[in-house]
Image: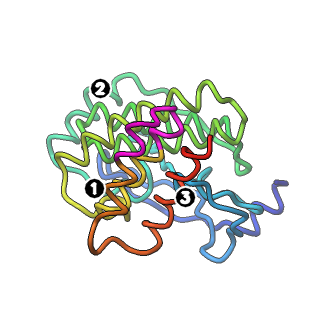
Amino acid sequence: MKQLDVLEHTFDKTITCPVCSSKFEIKCVKSKSPRILSKDSDFFIRYKSINPYFYDVWICNSCGYSAMKVDFPKMKSYQKDLVLKNITSKWKPRIYPDVMTEELAIEKYKLALITALSMEKQNSTIGMILIKISWMYRLLNNNLEELKYLSQALTAFENAYINENFPMYGLDRDSLTYLIGDLNRRLNNNDIALQWYSKVITTIGASYRVKELARTGKDSIKGN
């Protein structure tokens, strides 16, 4: 997108860093601006105008704290100390343009990943960052990197499924069960994928929508 188009679809917001209390401005995408083109089977949304994924990570240039916007304010005192020790001590400020690209989005998500690992964040957070990195590589048609990060996301989500409470990032238990199945299918773990899909299909109370997604995934494997 051109810079003028981006400026039409975004607004500036002042944020206070929960680590160092610095104030800084970030670009936010207007809620009515994104136009959905299509949705992939692993919940990746493709957009035909401005891409909200490009603006999903907020970074404090003063201390280096980076996180997805939904997680940015969430900070425990011991995590603040971990950021100061592991991130701030090595941080070099960087400036990002208004017009973001897949490559720049990947860089920001990777900074958020390093921060989340340094803060000992839950597997659901790690998994969500990893899957978004894989989606950015999908936009670049970089299959090798996409599958590498999908595989790591799968491991994180499997751990979250066992150890964390639902919902997580808008996913209820049935949705995450389906997603784990779909990631296995994308990684050619078809037998495991079928087990997870079947778990959704046979779950009493699972939504019609997620059951249909599981049936579609199951049929795609049977059809190959």
The mark total stands at: 3
Q: Is residue 1 left or right of residue 115?
A: right
**Is 98 on the left-hand or right-hand side of 78?**
right
Task: Specify whether residue 75 is painted magenta.
Answer: no
Find residue 74 and name its label: 1
Measuring from the top left, give residue 215's x and y in whole percent: 49, 60
Q: Which stretch appears magenta?
A: 183-195
Q: Position of residue 104 (x, y in %)?
A: 64, 37
Picture coordinates of residue 42 (x, y %)?
52, 51
Res 46 quadrant in image: bottom right
Report, in whole angstroms, how far the alpha carbon at label 2 lies from the one at label 1: 18 Å
Quadrant position of residue 41: bottom right
Reading the image, the residue beneath label 2 is 86
Residue 111 versus residue 67 in the image, above or below: above
Q: Is residue 197 above or below residue 12?
A: above
Which of the two discs, 2 and 3, labels the residue nearer the N terminus? 2
Quadrant in which the N terminus is drawn: bottom right
Q: CA distance from mark 1 to mark 3?
A: 37 Å
**Mark 1 neighbour density, 10 Å: few (under 14) some (14–19) many (20 or more):** few
Q: Residue, x 65% and y 29% (percent of image)?
A: 143
- The image quadrant that residue 48 belongs to is bottom right
Label 3 CA crowd tier, 10 Å (few <14, some 14–19, many 20+): some
189 magenta-colored: yes
**Looking at this view, is 81 or 38 the one in front?**
38
Q: Which residue is mark 3?
A: 216
